[in-house]
Image: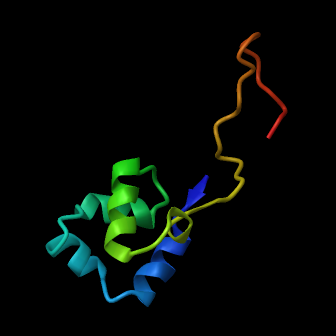
Amino acid sequence: MMSFKPFWATLKASEESTYTLINDYHISGSTIHKLRKNSPVNTTTLNDLCMILHCNVQDLMVYVPSDRDQPLWDRISGEKSDKH
């Protein structure tokens, strides 16, 4: 799963806040909620956050292996793959 824990550290180190993201940059409250819950966000949102916070995507998110990850499927046979 993708963790947005780095986003919160980057935001705290910046001059911005969730208030300014919502009110000055028009990032929706639901997007902030998704970031809090490590829910999927689109790449346009990630691009916007990188521009606003003057950072790279790795400053916003990190991959953390999880049992909640969807299983990979073998493209040929349609069976679950054991590869990670």
Residue sitting at 30 percent across and 83 percent down? 17
Q: Quadrant of residue 77?
A: top right
Who is closer to the viewer here, 69 or 77? 77
10 w.r.t. 58: above or below = below
- Residue 4's x, y, as percent? 51, 66
Residue sitting at 53 percent across and 71 percent down? 59
In this rendering, position of residue 27 left or right of residue 72: left
- Residue 29's x, y, as percent? 24, 64
Residue sitting at 49 percent across and 59 percent down? 38
5 w.r.t. 48: above or below = below
Q: Residue furthest right?
A: 82
Residue sitting at 57 percent across and 56 percent down? 2
71 w.r.t. 14: above or below = above
- Residue 24's x, y, as percent? 15, 75
In this rendering, position of residue 33 left or right of residue 23: right
- Residue 25's x, y, as percent? 19, 69
Q: Quadrant of residue 12?
A: bottom left
